[in-house]
Amino acid sequence: MIALLQRVSEARVEVDGDVVGAIGAGLLVLFCAEPNDTEALAQKMLSKILKLRVFGDAQGKMNLSVQDVGGGLLLVSQFTLAADTRSGNRPGFSGAAPPALGKALFDHFVALARAQHGVVETGRFATEMKVHLVNDGPITIPLHMH
């Protein structure tokens, strides 16, 4: 399971010109399931994301989590995080979960997030999305869990 987190002051996802998900300050999470991923791994990934200290405290040090600051989560499926670029110039995506598994794990990840966190918005699985964000910092953190 792969996630790319970006600390944002705001972010939104549009599909066909319509906003389908938007948050103020918080984390934009690009999410990719891999073929051997499980629901248990999704919970482990979510726990890490919710507790990751990437927000500034009163002294400006990154000591606070998205939960500590009451920030939003904008969850967006993105199979291209599994891109294999080791040979040639065209990335391969066989490292990503097949679409049915990817959707099931993304949906499970979203359900877990909604049960454990206040503000959770999403993109729309398997659609052409436009993601707008203001990266705050910039802070971008890659996570890869097996």
Image (spheres, helix red, strand yellow):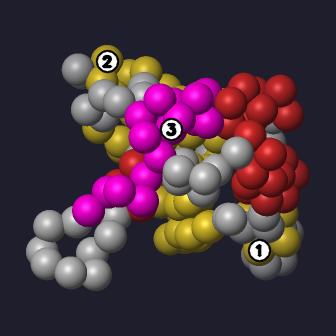
> Dot 2: few (<14), some (14–19), or many (≥20) neighbours within 10 Å?
few
Classify residue 127 by image quadrant: top left
CA gap between label 2 and label 1 equals: 34 Å
Q: Tell me the residue at 28%/81% (across/down).
A: 86
CA gap between label 3 and label 2 equals: 24 Å
Q: Nearer the viewer, mark 2 or mark 1?
A: 2
Residue 90 belongs to the span the image colors magenta: no
Disc on the earlier residue, 2 or 1: 2
Q: Position of residue 136 (x, y in %)?
A: 54, 62
Classify residue 106 by image quadrant: top right
Q: Is residue 19 left or right of residue 26?
A: left
Residue 98 belongs to the span the image colors magenta: yes
Q: Which residue is mark 2?
A: 18
Q: Residue furthest left?
A: 89
CA gap between label 1 and label 3 equals: 32 Å
Q: Is residue 49 above or below residue 146?
A: above
- Circles 3 and 2, Cβ within 8 Å, touching? The answer is no
Q: Tell me the residue at 68%/65% (across/down).
A: 146
Along the line of sight, the residue nearer the viewer: 115 or 73? 115
Q: Report the amino acid beneath label 2.
A: Asp
Range shown magenta: 92-107
> Dot 3: few (<14), some (14–19), or many (≥20) neighbours within 10 Å?
many
Q: Which residue is mark 1?
A: 62
Q: Position of residue 23 (x, y in %)?
A: 57, 35
Q: Is residue 119 visible?
A: no
Q: Nearer the viewer, mark 3 or mark 2?
A: 3
